[in-house]
Image (cartoon, grey):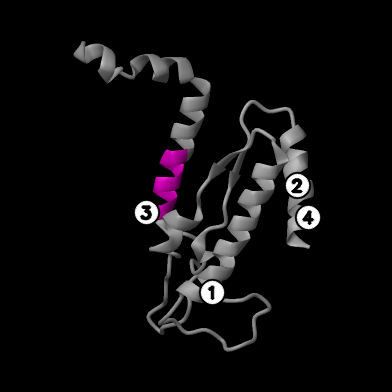
Amino acid sequence: KYREILTDFVNYIGLYPADLRVFRSTTAGWMRYGNFGFVWVIKNQSFPSSTHFIAKMNEIAYEVIRKSNHDIQIMDGFWLALSRADNTEATRENRPGKHMIHPGEAVIDAMGRRWFMLMMMHLCSDMFNSSIIDTKESVQ
């Protein structure tokens, strides 16, 4: 069902009138797997709690985007967030804080820089291309 819904979504995005279309993959901290050492109320979750599940979701998304032949860039959110999956926070009483599943500041900062570079490369590609030195020409 995920593949089917995502295919519809990718087709919608692909036909949307925009100069730049970007899909950001799911971050590694999306599930609770990264919150080891913090107090959680024990209850069954409907989602698997493994990073392999999240990686598989992203693989499906990449495949759907590639097969669509739409001009959609992919911004990786998974591998960037894997080593620091979440912004864990706990109170003095060791209760979960309000920032448990979202990527922390270091990951968000890196993602922000990547978004900025992607937009600049798209909007100012002539300037970027003209500033690159061709080493073959400069050696001759």
State yes or no: discs 2 and 4 in contact (Cβ < 8 Å): yes
Q: Identify the mark at residue 5; answer none if there is no mark.
A: 4
Residue 106 position, x and y percent, is 37, 54
Is 42 in the magenta?
no
Name of the residue lying farthest toward the left: 139
Identify the secondary structure beneath mark 4: helix
Q: Nearer the viewer, mark 2 or mark 3?
A: 2
Decide: is 80 above or below 23: below
- In the rendered structure, the answer to whether residue 4 lies left or right of residue 20 reads right
Amino acid type indicated by mark 3? Ala
User: Which is more N-terminal, label 3 or label 1?
Assistant: 1
Residue occupied by mark 2? 9
Q: Amino acid at mark 2?
A: Phe
Q: Is residue 2 above or below residue 111?
A: below
Disc number at residue 106?
Answer: 3
Point out the stretch of residues depicted in magenta: 106-114
Q: Residue at x 63, y 37 (%)?
A: 72
Q: Is residue 101 left or right of residue 23?
A: left
Asked if labels 3 and 1 touch by Cβ distance under 8 angstroms, the answer is no
Amino acid type indicated by mark 4: Ile
- Give the Cα distance between marks 1 and 3: 22 Å
